[in-house]
Image: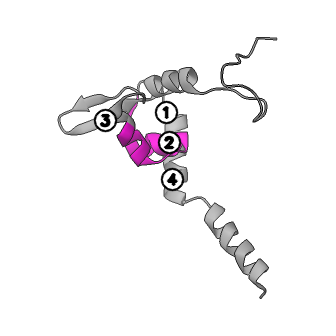
């Protein structure tokens, strides 16, 4: 097997989704908006790392969460609201950060 084929096979394996993450993502999107989720589930649903959500919880700027003793839980509706306010829609990489989309 050539080096190019080996690299392709490694990249192909890396692109495969962890079945556990896929299940967390599926459960999140199928749940009602009032359901509570842990950081791992929210990270899977948003396709971000758990450590990014931990950073947001420490520094601010992330989705709101509830403190239940030592547990941190995210309400799905709050996560979706935060996501819709935070995500920027771009049509290309040359779009300026200060440009706003106008409804058609």
Q: Which residue is mark 4?
A: 21
**Coloring basis for residues:** one colour
Mark 3 or 1: the one toward you: 3
Q: Position of residue 79 (x, y in %)?
A: 46, 28
In the picture, the disc for residue 58 is 3
Q: Is residue 21 visible?
A: yes
Sequence-wise, the earlier of marks 4 and 3 is 4
Residue that carries the numbered disc 1 in the rendered image: 31
Above or below, comparing residue 39 to residue 62 in the picture: below
Disc 2 to disc 1, how far (Cα)? 6 Å
Between the C-alphas of marks 3 and 1, the distance is: 27 Å
Residue that carries the numbered disc 2 in the rendered image: 27
Q: Is residue 102 magenta?
A: no
Write the residue at 47% across / 43% down.
Answer: 43
Left or right: 91, with 50 as reference point: right
Q: Residues within 10 Å of mark 1 (few under 14, many from 20)?
A: few
Give the SS element for disc 4. helix
Q: Which residues are magenta?
A: 35-55
Asked whether the beta carbons under mark 1 and mark 4 sit within 8 Å of each other, the answer is no
Find the distance from the CA under tag 1 to the CA under tag 4: 16 Å
Q: Residue furthest bottom?
A: 1
Q: Are marks 3 and 1 in contact (CB under 8 Å)?
A: no
The tag earlier along the polypeptide, 1 or 4, is: 4
Q: Earlier in the sequence, mark 3 or mark 1?
A: 1
- Quarter where residue 52 is shown: top left
């Amino acid at each position: 097997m050539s080096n190019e084929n080996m690299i392709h096979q490694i990249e192909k394996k890396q692109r495969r989704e962890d079945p556990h993450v896929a299940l967390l993502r599926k459960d999140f999107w199928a749940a009602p908006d009032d359901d509570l989720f842990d950081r791992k589930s929210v990270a899977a649903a948003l396709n971000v790392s758990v450590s990014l959500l931990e950073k947001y919880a420490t520094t601010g700027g992330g989705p709101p969460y509830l403190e239940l003793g030592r547990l941190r839980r995210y309400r799905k509706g709050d996560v979706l609201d935060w996501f819709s306010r935070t995500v920027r829609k771009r049509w290309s990489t040359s779009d300026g950060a200060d440009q706003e989309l106008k409804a058609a």
